[in-house]
Image (cartoon, coloured by chain):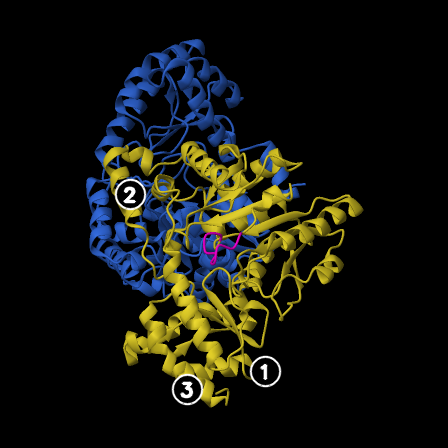
Chain colours: A yellow, B blue
Amino acid sequence: MIADKMVGLVNNNSAIRMMFEEGKRLAAIHGAENVYDFSLGNPNVPAPASLNKAIKEILDEEESTFVHGYMSNAGYEDVRETVAQSLNRRFGTSFTQNNIIMTVGAAGGLNSALKAIVNPGDEIVTFAPYFLEYRAYVSNFDGVLVEVSPDTATFQPNIEEFEKKITPKTKAVIINNPNNPTGVVYSEETVKKLVAVMEAKQKEYGTEIYLISDEPYRELAYDGVDVPYLTKYYANTIVGYSFSKSLSLPGERIGYLVIPSEMPDYKNVFAAASIATRVLGFVNAPSLMQRAVARVIDEQTDIAYYNRNRELLYNSLTEYGFQCVKPEGAFYLFVKSPVADEKEFVNKAKEYNILMVPGSSFACPGYVRIAYCVAYETIERSLESFKDLAKNYDLI
Amino acid sequence: MIADKMVGLVNNNSAIRMMFEEGKRLAAIHGAENVYDFSLGNPNVPAPASLNKAIKEILDEEESTFVHGYMSNAGYEDVRETVAQSLNRRFGTSFTQNNIIMTVGAAGGLNSALKAIVNPGDEIVTFAPYFLEYRAYVSNFDGVLVEVSPDTATFQPNIEEFEKKITPKTKAVIINNPNNPTGVVYSEETVKKLVAVMEAKQKEYGTEIYLISDEPYRELAYDGVDVPYLTKYYANTIVGYSFSKSLSLPGERIGYLVIPSEMPDYKNVFAAASIATRVLGFVNAPSLMQRAVARVIDEQTDIAYYNRNRELLYNSLTEYGFQCVKPEGAFYLFVKSPVADEKEFVNKAKEYNILMVPGSSFACPGYVRIAYCVAYETIERSLESFKDLAKNYDLI
């Protein structure tokens, strides 16, 4: 007697999540140290010590009924102002608290943003490969997800196809930069091409087309690569951010939306997204964690740690004959499967106690995602298994 | 360019929330101590000291990547088991972790439950007066909220009308016990009548009708009154709980769903509600707070504090000539407006710096909700103003 929309989801639960459960099962059999679980984007770098210190200080210094109590649905005003000023310092923007809505992670923020703008039948364009939950989020509001097919040579957005996929029914475009699952970063040049298309289409159709930028990996960029701040390029941008990766807090569900004042319908969109936060049942972002991230707003995770992982895994896997675009951001490798059916490859890898996620979970079959947010030692220990796996496919 | 569904919500934002903002405005003018804000259910009793102590201990004792990390969407297994055992001790149930889903407050839980079971056009029955957000929650899934009109003599459910309102399209019934806004508690006798109707209708129509029991006020019951645990009376019950009131944590968004194994379609409903938690963007209940409430699972808020407030306010207001059913639970008085249009009464009260919420915000015009989760001293100081207000209406 469950809802029709849920039947498919129950029968075909997230492959990523299933792999997470599989990892726990294998660890129980073989010992955790002998299972190489590259399936989940669960940061293994601890949260900064300053974060836990901040939590304790808040509990000592601030009133319980304030710290644990209700506030405006958009979040504490001082926290929102702190977020705005931090963005301004880093990106030369000019936000205030009136541009920030604290959210239950980026997933909560994206759903509030979509609830605010999407009518049934509206089209939401995104670029494959993409985080498959986007499909569920868009479906929550009876929108239609429209995919732009992947450019597997570079995994940069296919601008020509993008242009063709925008119609008068296009309400929004979702991008994810740096990208999960490819690790690719969209350069300023790419962003300019992307928004030029959107500006032209807005004019052509007389519509507003929102650019929703999902940015949990913003801080995870390597080799000094620049990740453009999109509100500076396009007024109808909504940024969805999460502290899940930058402060290693994925379980805490804390993030924010940025809705710039330059947006033509700013006032209504901001109000709608704030109210959406309430009526979707989030009510507000977790209160103590709002106050905690504000106290450590300029802290960053240990990028050097992930970078060391990236270099070891990328260099080793390509040495063994696997093919992969070198990622500039996030903590994923998106590796070409040596056989057409990447699920077969994923199952074969399991025999070597290696867990990874099939690309079809990102609307991009023929590839696998390997999350390297694991201990460096895990990668070291896994290399023999990867080598054996490569031999199995005659890559070495 | 916001979504059609949001237009009404933006133009007519929650009266409760607007009153909250109004309270902040008046406090800035007259000083917080001279504004008697009875508008919001924001507990003023601090969280138990043991809760803050537990948070600190967790940060010292448990791994950062575990405490702040992802877990199964339904929540940490040990936390869910702790919740289950606590319920079993208190209510003689026999739950395990497989009956518990940790949620982003009761609001998050209710939305996950509705997502799990509601198809567009399904009818969800509830009893006026009710928390108006139910309407938004049901609308999130294109369900139709069906109201049973209030019995204003007792504010107990009108069983005869209830029976008539159940149709073959009825998918669920939402009750809120103890009740917001009336403070009324449904007795075992009432519950038995209610579920007898539902059992009969299930048989008559060959349908499953879920009883969703929204119970954030379960622990707030006075004079030793019993609040029946509904899974013991009806197998198709889903309980939505929140620690917002029992531990004074409304901002933290922490609660749980109970889905009993006796439910005929238990396996699918449990799976669907877990997945709904993910696809709605909650992902999981805030991780640190899950672990914290588990450590203090048998703690209670200071009921005596609220009881003292209840007695003072109820006795004073009825002495001044206001009419009100004496509440047995929660922390609200639901007072009859001395004039037919209770919004006029609410506005008049504002002139005396008294803030309360019109009953039309609970689908029950002609009444006002007065939340007494405030300092005892606030009630004491407000009494002269209430007396003047009563005089204004010639009640004294």
What amino acid type should be assigned to the residue bearing mark 1? Ala
**Residue A267 percent coordinates (x, y):** 60, 33
Q: How far apart are marks 3 and 2 (CA)?
A: 46 Å
Q: Earlier in the sequence, mark 1 or mark 3?
A: 1
Q: Tell me the tag on residue A55.
A: 2
| Residue range highlighted in magenta | A218-226
* Residue at left offset 37%, top offset 13%: B385
**Residue A204 percent coordinates (x, y):** 80, 47
Circle 1 sits on which residue?
A: A340
* Residue at left offset 76%, top offset 51%: A168
Element on which disc 3 rests: helix
- Note whether residue A378 is visible: yes
Q: Tell me the tag on residue A360.
A: none
The chain containing the residue under callout 1 comes to A
Element on which disc 1 rests: loop
The chain containing the residue under callout 3 comes to A
**Residue A62 percent coordinates (x, y):** 28, 33
Q: Which of marks 2 and 1 is nearer the N terminus?
A: 2
What amino acid type should be assigned to the residue bearing mark 2? Ile
CB within 8 Å, label 1 to label 3: no
Circle 3 sits on which residue?
A: A388
